[in-house]
Image (tube, rainbow, N blue to C red):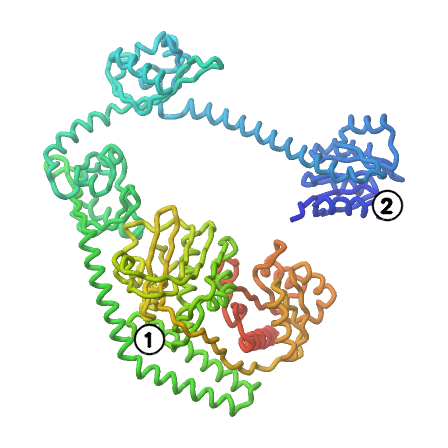
């Protein structure tokens, strides 16, 4: 991709300016340029956002030296390169002294691009240096403010114990009014230790490891009072490797240490409790937990003491849930309920919790603490969920089986009659359009019925002999669009692969479901591999995989390089409605449908996955010796009539663009075509007044999307109709509302759908225009 370059050219000869631009483009630049040849124009065009200025040394009313003076007066850091037909060395040196970045002779234009590149890079280097210096100054100022204002004590001391520097918090911690008072009174750090051996121990640890982390020791205040402090310290070495000084932070943990002693006494009495117990203060700060709590949450008591129970929040409950809980206990009442929380390792668990307020004075005073008793009911809830799920699936199966016969008979009658009526009415009339909508609705209803029946294994499969290699090849383009550009797809096909007997629609659904599952497992991109082969399943294989059976099978392996599936989740991935995705991001039906379809085809699925190493699904389907039959395509339906309107079609895929344009021309439209936004702009400039509809792909090369192209053209012509198309769903992040059948035509689309939506878009917009007038 060409590098964008904002350039101002000071040149009175347009031909010379074009030569310069030609050299820049040949060197890989994409110049955004203006040419000026007077001092006034030059001054008006100066902009700190310019990347470079190319100035002819001598112009009729102006010269490069004057341009340098003007540029210098603005203070802009924009490199200026002098170009001349002939320039003496003394003049060139003078120009460099006055601030020119370089000079180039016109008969040596080959240097221009190199000079521009060097000047731009030098400017970027200067900018980076200036930013680094500014960042350093800001960092030093932040450190100074932090040192002076932080609530933690901060110090620097020499190996022999002399205080080099302390902050106000450190001085207050040891009973001094200011750092200056402390520095004047304390000559050695050893005076701050209540026990001399603590300093020796810490010094030895720092010399051995280079630091200490959260070491707790007793300190001595100025008045002789002992305090507990938590210290972090490191050794700072000089260029010879010797320790120059120590620096670190301290925190007064006296109150915490006292609380810990009290809590240890309480914990001894409650340690044998089977349920988790948590004691917090009135603000919710945890002061004590028992062993059952740490077992339940995977947090140690040290990690949660002083914390708020919100560290366990799972995000499963709304704000109102916690507001009601706090209102209850702060009012002095006991709260009971079920909560979904999150362990330290990120796994969720369900607990039954009772929170009781504790009042001062044995129940008559103000609330001082809360005691929460927790019981892990995850296993019980899982059993209840499994029972409900089983009942749900049984109900779905019973419902599907009960309505299948009558409902499918009704749909058959509807579809058969609409087919007969299509032959008896005007194919281009409104009745044909309405009839087609009825047909599509009936077909969609039939599709929904087939999906429900899949779970009960009562779906009537349309079995035929087919070759799995050909099926995958036929879906490759669609799969590429489904998985996106950041996922590479690699297909390996076995030679002479036997046929399978299958419902091609169902097999295609399995492939798409697995591709979508792989895509979602690789949010940052990766590789999707599909491999077919013929395998012989023996007794040993059956012993390892109970679902298998001996014989020859066509195997399809679908593998991704995603994050893998956690072991605790593996047993549930094929369960209907089970999903690890966020609410609204998945139904949990994809893998369940795939599993059910494979079972209906007398096969099975084996799953292999490891966290961090990806996932592989292996599908086994019985092999047949017969050659695969080619799938029969449905007879093409007649398309709605067209019109005299002029349509601009913008599509980067050549085949899609040609087919789209051909279909529209056969409908009677005049069609203009473009391969990208730049090409579309060229066509637009020539035919703007005639174009009534823009049909554009949303995603195109060149950095300009279909939305951006439409906005540009509609600014020039507000009444322009726009119809977007894309291989992605209308809910993708396009930044605008797209509605299928109105202003969005999803891919893939057939001739009839294209004709109908184009016609509807044009007609609807015309109605809207009349209403506005």
| Sooner in the amino-acid sequence: mark 1 or mark 2 | 2
What residue sits 53% from the left and 90% below the top? 425
Q: Quarter-wise, where is residue 576 in the image?
A: bottom left
Decide which of 265, 493 is in the foreground and name it. Answer: 493
Label 2 belongs to which residue?
A: 13
Mark 1 crowd level (few <14, some 14–19, many ≥20, 10 Å Cα): some
Residue 730 seen in this snapshot: no
The vertical placement of 464 against 492, above or below, is: below
Per the rendering, the mark at residue 356 is: none
Per the rendering, the mark at residue 459 is: 1
Q: CA distance from mark 1 to mark 2?
A: 78 Å
Q: Quarter-wise, where is residue 571 in the image?
A: bottom left
The vertical placement of 523 against 209, above or below, is: below
Task: State which quarter of the image contains the C terminus.
Answer: bottom right
Q: Position of residue 591 (x, y in %)?
A: 35, 62
Residue 578 seen in this snapshot: yes
């Amino acid at each position: 991709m060409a590098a964008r370059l904002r350039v101002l050219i000071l040149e009175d000869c347009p031909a010379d300016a074009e030569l310069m631009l030609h050299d820049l483009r040949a060197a890989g630049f994409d110049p955004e340029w203006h040419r000026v040849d007077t001092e006034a124009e030059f001054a008006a065009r100066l902009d700190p956002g310019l990347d470079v200025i190319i100035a002819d040394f001598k112009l009729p009313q102006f010269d490069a030296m004057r341009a340098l003076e003007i540029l210098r007066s603005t203070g802009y850091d924009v490199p200026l390169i002098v170009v001349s037909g002939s320039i003496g060395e003394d003049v060139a040196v003078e120009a460099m002294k006055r601030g020119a970045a370089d000079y180039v002779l016109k008969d040596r234009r080959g240097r221009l691009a190199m000079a521009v590149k060097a000047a731009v890079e030098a400017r970027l280097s200067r900018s980076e240096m200036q930013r680094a210096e500014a960042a350093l100054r800001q960092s030093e100022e932040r450190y100074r403010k932090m040192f002076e204002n932080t609530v933690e004590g901060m110090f620097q001391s020499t190996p022999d114990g002399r205080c080099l520097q302390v902050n106000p918090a450190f001085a207050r911690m040891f009973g001094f009014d200011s750092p200056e008072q402390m520095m004047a009174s304390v000559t050695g750090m050893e005076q701050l230790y209540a026990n001399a051996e603590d300093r020796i121990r810490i010094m030895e640890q720092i010399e051995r490891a280079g630091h200490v982390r959260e070491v707790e020791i007793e300190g001595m205040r100025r008045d002789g009072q002992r305090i507990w402090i938590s210290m972090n310290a490191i050794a700072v070495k000089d260029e010879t490797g010797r320790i120059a000084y120590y620096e670190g932070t301290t925190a007064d943990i006296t109150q915490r240490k006292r609380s810990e002693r009290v809590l240890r006494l309480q914990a001894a009495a409650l340690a044998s409790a089977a349920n988790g117990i948590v004691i917090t203060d009135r603000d919710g700060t945890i002061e004590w937990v028992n062993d059952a709590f740490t077992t339940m949450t995977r947090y140690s008591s040290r990690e949660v003491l002083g914390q708020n129970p919100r560290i366990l929040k799972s995000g499963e409950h709304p704000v109102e849930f916690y507001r009601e809980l706090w209102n209850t206990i702060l009012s002095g009442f006991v709260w009971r309920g079920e909560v979904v929380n999150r362990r330290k390792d990120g796994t969720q668990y369900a607990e039954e919790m009772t929170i009781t307020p504790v009042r001062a004075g044995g129940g008559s005073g103000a609330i001082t603490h809360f005691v929460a008793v927790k019981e892990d009911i995850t296993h019980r809830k899982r059993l209840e969920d499994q029972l409900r799920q089983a009942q749900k699936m049984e109900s779905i199966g019973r419902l599907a089986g009960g309505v299948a016969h009558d409902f499918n008979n009704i749909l058959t009658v509807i579809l058969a009659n609409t087919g007969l009526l299509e032959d008896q009415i005007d194919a281009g009339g409104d009745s044909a359009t309405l009839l087609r909508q009825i047909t599509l609705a009936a077909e969609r209803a039939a599709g929904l019925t087939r999906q429900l029946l899949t779970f009960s294994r009562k779906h009537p499969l349309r079995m035929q002999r087919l070759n799995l290699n050909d099926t995958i090849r036929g879906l490759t383009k669609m799969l590429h669009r489904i998985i996106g550009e950041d996922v590479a797809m690699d297909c390996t096909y076995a030679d002479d692969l036997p046929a399978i007997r299958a419902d091609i629609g169902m097999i295609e659904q399995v492939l798409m479901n697995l591709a979508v599952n792989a895509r979602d497992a690789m949010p940052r991109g990766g590789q999707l591999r599909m491999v077919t082969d013929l395998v012989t399943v023996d007794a040993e294989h059956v012993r390892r995989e109970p679902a298998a059976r001996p014989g020859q099978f066509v195997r399809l392996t679908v593998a991704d390089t995603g994050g893998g599936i956690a072991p605790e989740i593996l047993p549930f991935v094929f369960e209907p409605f089970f999903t690890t995705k966020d609410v609204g991001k998945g139904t949990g039906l994809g893998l369940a449908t795939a599993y059910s379809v494979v079972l209906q085809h007398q096969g099975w699925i084996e799953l292999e996955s490891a966290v961090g190493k990806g996932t592989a699904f292996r599908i086994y389907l019985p092999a047949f010796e017969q050659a695969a039959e080619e799938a029969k395509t449905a007879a093409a339906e007649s398309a709605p009539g067209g019109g005299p309107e002029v349509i601009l079609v913008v599509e980067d895929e050549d085949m899609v663009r040609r087919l789209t344009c051909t279909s529209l021309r056969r409908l009677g439209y005049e069609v203009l075509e473009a391969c990208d936004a730049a090409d579309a702009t060229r066509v637009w400039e020539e035919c703007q007044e005639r174009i009534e509809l823009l049909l554009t792909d949303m995603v195109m090369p060149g950095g300009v999307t279909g939305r951006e192209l439409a906005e540009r053209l509609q600014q020039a012509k507000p009444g322009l109709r726009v119809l977007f198309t894309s291989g992605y769903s209308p809910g993708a992040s396009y930044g605008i509302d797209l509605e299928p059948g109105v202003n969005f035509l999803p891919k893939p689309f057939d001739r009839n759908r294209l004709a109908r939506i184009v016609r509807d878009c044009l007609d609807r917009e015309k109605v809207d225009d009349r209403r506005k007038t």
